[in-house]
Amino acid sequence: MRRIASTPRADGRQRLEAQGFRFHTIDGEPYWREDVCYVFDADQIDVLEAATNELHALCLEAVDRVVRHARYADLGLDERAATLIERSWWDREPALYGRMDLSCDGASPPRLLEYNADTPTALFEASVAQWYWLQDTAPDADQFNSIHEALVERWRTLPPASHVHFAACYESTEDALTCDYLVDTCLQAGHRATALDVEQVGWSGKDFIDLDNAPIERLFKLYPWEWMLAEPFAQHLPQTRLRWFEPAWKMVLSNKAILPLLWEFFPGHPNLLPASRRRGDLQGAVVRKPYWGREGAGVVVLDAGSAEGPVTEPCIYQAFSPLPVFDGRHALVGSWVVGDNAVGIGLREDDDRVTRNTSCFVPHLFR
């Protein structure tokens, strides 16, 4: 695993914008970088793929154990959430996609930092933008990236010509692009698709409905389950047989409190890090993470012996696994799962130890 200099495309910005990628720059600073790239060898890609598949299997086993033994309190989930989770799990409602954030230096076993299993973004960058970058700059190389093809195939598991609605906060440029891209993959699979802002989803007294008052049968929502449960319409969630993407059982995995349970269920696993709901259970430096934090919000690295300060929300503690540093930049591997299979990676980097929504996306290749 190496970080090397790369010659940016002369028309790179125009090509990104033509693809619909309008947030390549955030607050005047580059979010997408192609003056550098990360290079792997084929064996390292095989290790990442195998580790992701292994971790996903462990996560599904963990969901099953949580449901069978009603471990919801360990996740901060109430009875309403438990009812939805159990129904979706026993009905085997299918998942669409997710992103595992891994600490990986190319030499040691990849370690799971968290599983963005409900509303992962950075999808378009990983699936589309970096693939076209590769074709333009290094067509003789390869890339661990079959994300697009896997998404189209995943949609094809639905009954032919299904009607799928999509909802997101469209005032967010990133959410809008992610949702619109998934609409495109759904259309390519031969289905009908309707995009809505989250606030445009209505309730008829019997069904969730769209702007034409048509019942919604399948809904992809780029809106976290914990936010949905806090909304006034949450009272209607148990009444509908609407199929959700992602299904309610993803509440178990998108919650960072799953990390201590994974360590409890599979202690010492080489792809997991020690984790607990109590700092005192772990030695050395730890990372404090809120149960429902997103994009690095609330994540704090606590060095050994350092004072913790006030804790205002439910948190877990995970053994600190430093990200590899290249040229002063901390590199994080986002490994994508579609259905139940690892299908590609995207890399983010930052000069800070915590990856945030403004951390740069950098393309990769392997030879």
Image (cartoon, rainbow, N blue to C red):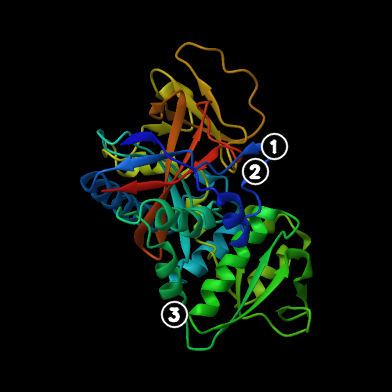
Of marks 3 and 2, the one in the foreground: 2
Rendered view: 266 above or below 93:
above
- At 39% across and 46% down in the image, what residue appears? 364
Image location (x, y in percent) of residue 339: 40, 66
Image location (x, y in percent) of residue 304: 44, 14
How dense is the environment of label 3, judged by Cα within 10 Å: few (below 14), some, or many (20 and up)? some
Q: Residue furthest front?
A: 10
Residue at the spot of label 3: 156
- Secondary element under disc 1, as helix, strand or loop, is loop
Are circles 2 and 1 on residues that touch, CB within 8 Å?
yes
Residue at the spot of label 2: 25
Image location (x, y in percent) of residue 219: 61, 72
Amino acid at pointer 3: Arg
Q: Is residue 359 visible?
A: yes
| 290 left or right of 215 in image | left
Q: Residue furthest left?
A: 43
Amino acid at pointer 1: Gly
- Name the N-terminal-most of marks 1 and 3: 1
Q: Is residue 322 visible?
A: no
Of marks 1 and 3, the one in the foreground: 1
User: For the residues marked 3 and 2, what is the alpha-carbon distance in whole angstroms?
Assistant: 34 Å
Residue at the spot of label 1: 28
Image location (x, y in percent) of residue 337: 40, 58
- Secondary element under disc 2, as helix, strand or loop, is strand
- Name the N-terminal-most of marks 3 and 2: 2
Residue 308, image quadrant: top right
Amino acid at pointer 2: Thr
